[in-house]
Amino acid sequence: MRRQTLLSSLLLAVLLLLAGCGGNAADPPPSASTVEAAPTADANAYWDLVQQAQEAYDDARFEDAVVLARQAATLNPADNTSWELYRQATIAQAGDEYLSTLPGHRFRLPVDVLLRDQVNKSKDWFLIDVRNPDEFAAGHIEGAVNFPLNEFMQHLDELPSSKTAPILLYCHTQKRATHALVIMHELGYIKTYNLEGGYAAYQEWINSKPLPTPGPTSTPAPEEPDYGC
């Protein structure tokens, strides 16, 4: 009995609400989704900017995509769509700038150029070995410091103070050092190179060929980089 009374009261309240709003019992109340979907000027502007940013990203206009996605995020910082697009566009812009300016030698320094520089003391390379500590302990290039790749970012305070200092990275075969090379260039260390072939190539040269002699030497070709300093 009590349940029937409660249901009757609720039904009466609904009928009175509909009557007061100019509706009738036959008209269904608006759903929550319908109310939430009602567009506003800011919402329209937000999604328009998101669409423009996505189109710019798809067209590889990453700089425009970054600007548009940032504007969208300012309009609606609570929605993650614009933030995720902003993150992707920022990474794409940095990657595009790096790859589009990549020189023919791809920042690789041949072993014989390093040895020539060391013998002639013509360039003071800051040598970074990105291999694991046990690999470093088993043998490394004299004067190198050990920044293991998985701990590389914890050693940034040990880098040269000048962003134009000549820095040479190496691992065993050049693969791991390539990851560190990209990071270094993104951090602004524009004179950073990889040792071509890595420590394996260095050992092979030392064990099979004579060291360069002090004094003028012929320029190795074709991969020697233009230091520009």
Image (tube, rainbow, N blue to C red):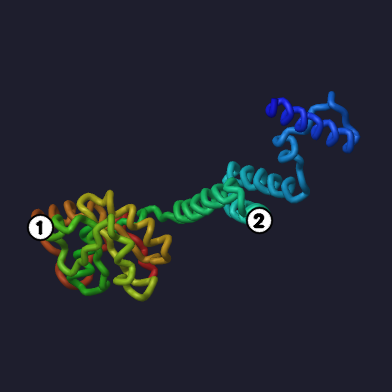
Residue that extends furthest to the front in the rendered view of this protein: 1
Residue at image position (20%, 52%) is 172
The location of residue 155, given as percent across then percent down, is: 29, 66
Residue visible at 16% across and 72% down in the picture: 214
Residue at the disc numbered 1: 138
Query: Residue at (71%, 36%) from the top-left corner?
Result: 32
Tell me: 151 left or right of 20: left
Image-based side of 81 in relation to 118, left or right: right
Q: Measuring from the top left, give residue 138's x and y in whole percent.
A: 10, 57
Mark 1 or 2 closer to N-term? 2
Q: Position of residue 19 (x, y in %)?
A: 89, 33
Q: CA distance from mark 1 to mark 2?
A: 53 Å
Could you tell me residue 100's position as x and y percent? 48, 52
Amino acid type, callout 1:
Ala
Q: Nearer the viewer, mark 1 or mark 2?
A: 2
Q: Secondary structure at mark 2?
A: helix
Residue at image coords 74%, 35%: 34
Local crowd at mark 1 within 10 Å, few (<14), some, or many (≥20)? few
Q: Is residue 147 above or below residue 162?
A: above
Any part of residue 201 in sight: yes
Query: Identity of the amino acid at label 2?
Result: Gln
Tag 1, which secondary structure?
A: helix
**Looking at the rendered structure, which numbered label has been put on residue 71?**
2
**172 w.r.t. 188: above or below:** above
Which of the two residues, 2 or 190, is positioned nearer the viewer here?
A: 2
* Residue at the right extreme, as displayed: 22
> Is 35 situated above or below 42?
above
